[in-house]
Image: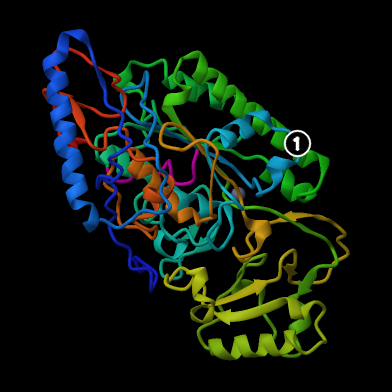
Amino acid sequence: MAAAPFAAGDSPSPTAALLPHSHSGATPSPRPSSTSSRLHILLTAALAITTSYLLLHHHHRTPLSAAPAATARPQVKLEKPVVILISSDGFRFGYHHKAPLPHIHRLIGNGTSAATGLIPVFPTLTFPNHYSIATGLYPSSHGIINNYFPDPISGDYFTMASHESKWWLGEPLWVTAVDQGIQAATYFWPGSEVKKGGWDCPEKYCRHYNGSVPFEERVDSILGYFDLPSDELPQFMTLYFEDPDHQGHQVGPDDPAITEAVEHMDEMIGRLIDGLEARGVFEDVNIILVGDHGMVGTCDKKLVFLEELAPWIELEKDWVLSMTPLLAIRPPDDLLLQDVVSKMNEGLRSGKVENGEYLRMYLKEDLPSRLHYSENYRIPPIIGLVEEGYKVEMKRSNKNECGGAHGYDNAFFSMRTIFIAHGPRFEGGRVVPSFENVEIYNVIASILNMEPAPNNGSASFPDTILLPKFCDNVAIFQEEQVYCNQLQELPAGYSVGNNSQC
Ligand SMILES: [Zn+2]
């Protein structure tokens, strides 16, 4: 059985990422060489025609007041646009102020970043969020509704090691790319080992997850792609690091171990920048550095024990499919779901359950719609929302531990992560309002000139964050080959046309 493809109220529309932008004034003209003066005339004429066309039709276009005024920097060395999408797991927004982090701040200063961070999707867990970034879909649409869950119909169990395509709905970026003839490479990303569409996780371009591979080796492998012949260089690459999530769970977000972990992440970003600079391509590459969610401190007194609800309802352990922070319950069929929710909430509000006021139960269809967490048969029927920093356990124990957790309501500021982007399509020193990570799919599709699959992002979002393409008003091509974005001179044998091929 297929899951509902899209959440109610989220009717996704195929985006128009290939529509030309309307910024005619600032388009840089390619400089003609001395041997191509006739082409220069042609080019000037074409620019004039295109410009007047755009001026004539400008009033039909939606004004893009939020869009930057400049156009993209021309690429110097690489022939095609390239995106490296990097995830630093659990990089809570604000961690980048824990230490100087010169390399990350170089990307921020010369790139575009989200003012108060990137907003994760609910539940703020690793697999749902990474796959939302890759597909532009909410978990209810892409099917990865938790890090682990049973399929209520087949009884099969999803874990973070499940690579069968039946679990992974939607179309991740690496599939969109290869299906449109664009080379992609994944150095770890949830879902990247799944065979889907034209993507079969090829040995040369797809790494099978192994958390013990040193971060340095991961960076160096990405750099190695830039030593390949240009037609073998992937245009889309993912790079994944488990830190600082790993440390955050152990010690919480405010601990010297976190500062150390983010300093190490900064070293890895520096290693990547150095390697790209040594190859003369740093300014040509679009680097997008994100996290999947934030982190909040948890401690022994912030606990709710479900056994204390026994006077109202005795919960069986096997009804509870996920405990904390996302409490997900599927009671047996002979119980009325609404009764279970009512009895639990009655107990939680009675004042007789420790911290009961910090947990509230919902039928999934009654959850706030902003969570987009009901329209999938895989989502258990009863969901509990726990307050920031609280955890749920079955039985009281003598455990006395403090650490960190995520998975909470994505409205909590502690769950926010980073969005930092640098490259020819991102304006330097620009700060944009925070946005949800489902917007990233369309942004990358736009940079790579791909037709995006239907998704929950907004079709107009890329225009608000990207510089218009260098060749928006004019394309330069020789026979079948189209050169967009990189030519500064017009060599002999090239001609000028409209931008329909960009
Ligand atoms: Zn994570």
Query: What residue appears at the point 64 percent right and 64 percent down from the top-left corner?
Result: 408
Task: Write the residue at 33% across / 63% down.
Answer: 12
Q: Count every numbered label the image shows and give the total.
A: 1
Picture coordinates of residue 196, whole percent (x, y): 32, 46
Locate residue 213 relative to residue 388 in the image: left or right: left
Q: Is residue 267 left or right of residue 182?
A: right
- Of 225 and 210, nearer the camera is 225
The residue tagged 1 is 99
Residue 115 lies, with reference to residue 79, above or below; the image says: below
Judge whether 24 appears above or below 302 on screen: above
Secondary structure under the numbered disc 1 in the rendered image: loop
Q: Is residue 432 visible?
A: yes
**Quarter of the figure with the N terminus:** bottom left
Q: Quadrant of residue 78?
A: top left
The answer to whether residue 212 is seen in the rendering is no
Q: Quadrant of the C terminus?
A: top left
